[in-house]
Amino acid sequence: MQENRTIPKVEGKSQTANMIREGYQFLRNRRKGLQSNIFETHVLGEKVICLSGEKAAELFYDTEKFIRKGAMPKRFQETLTGEGGVQSLDGAAHQHRKEAFMSLMSADKINQLKEMARGQWERKLSDFEKQQEVNVYKEAQELLLRLACQWAGVPLKEKEVQEKKEAIIQLFESPVTLGYKQWKAKKARQVLETWLGGLIKSVRKGDLIPFEGTAMKVFAFHRDENNELLKERIAAVEVLNIIRPIVAISIYIAFEVHAIIQHPQEHKRLASGDEKDLQDFVQEVRRLYPFFPFNAARVKKDFTWEGYTFKKGTLTMLDFYGTNHDPSIWNNPEVFNPMRFKEEPITPYNLIPQGGGEFVLNHRCAGEWATIEVMKVSLDYFANRMTFDVPKQDLSYSLVDIPSIPKSKIILKNVKRKNY
């Protein structure tokens, strides 16, 4: 029987200010200082157990030990995820709702998304050739909004594009901000939920008929585990939980182009257009570059793990960024090296930029496959289907700002379609 062990503690009062100040590095810095993949601290007004690493991720996604109810701060729900969405559910309710999401992620649906993405990039590349300067991050946001609405069955009028784009950006660019920015993001979500809620109502009345298998059709008529239709607002939240993450891929696309610019040798390997080379490059972008820093859950019932005692109700945080940069998992983790995946296998718990575990049973992001495929299509366009000049700019990115985005947003000039 393993002896009881005391969880290492961060001394001092609340660490909330330090968490905001240090961003992605907060949990990682404490872990290094304490030389432990588990430690206790105080943030957001309560005691928190912090975890990092592959074994810790496997523990964190054990649904017998952790639940999501009451774990995510309310202001995150008011901006990033929406109240009543799948991220806040547990048990049968979570599995039932998650199955609806996974029905959108079949091979046929993902292939449809890829074809739509290619069509969007073809049109966008024609636009790029007419522009003196291209802002990759901003252009990707617009493209991805059009793609997300097209795939989700959400009608988007041309005059609505900029307004809806700016509102959705507020949701994922301001989840950890305070004051006016957070208020703006909250208002943006209310506007978006009202818009989508109205469309859900039109679908149910028969005034709007989306294609079968689209998010709009699925969630308009989805029934919960009690066989009741979702409230219009909850259905709107879930449709937005398809659209928002797709638009947020714009961050990854900016980092993809960043990697192309900074690592020309790796860029050359993509010239063949080989699917595995594109996949490995995308996975290394997702591993190395900062995206979502951590996730939270609460202990479901008292248990002991590796001699450490977890008490029911304790808030627990898993370090995504730290796990993706863990030297005990990854060889030279700070080095961009897509070739690593030929020797370093990906498991459900070591590469976790969008969560870990299984898709249906656990809280791994349902849209992870969609993210990877859209990134691959986008990467192929920037790496193999266009040429461009890179003007002088600030390509640095912060590990304090959440989300982190390259300072210049990635500026390109003289974009031309490649002639084959």
Image (cartoon, rainbow, N blue to C red):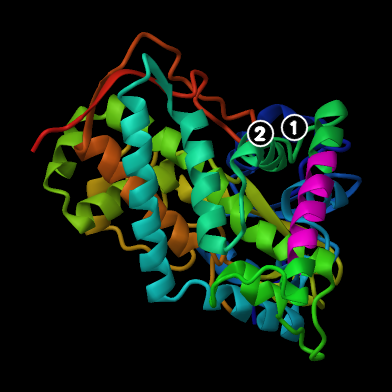
The answer to the question of whether label 1 and label 2 lie on touching residues, with beta carbons closer than 8 A, is yes
- At x 46%, y 38%, the residue is 289
Location of residue 299 (image quadrant): bottom right
Q: Please name the residue that numbered disc 2 is placed on.
A: 23
Which secondary structure lies at badge 2?
helix
Which numbered dot is residue 20?
Answer: 1
Q: Point out the stretch of residues depicted in magenta.
A: 187-200
For the residues labelled 1 and 2, the Cα–Cα distance comes to: 5 Å
Say if residue 53 shows up in the picture: no
Percent x, y for residue 304?
A: 72, 75
Percent x, y for residue 158?
A: 59, 40
Looking at the image, the residue that sits furthest to the left is 420
- At x 43%, y 19%, the residue is 395
Location of residue 4 (image quadrant): bottom right
Which numbered dot is residue 203?
Answer: none
Q: Amino acid at mark 2?
A: Gly
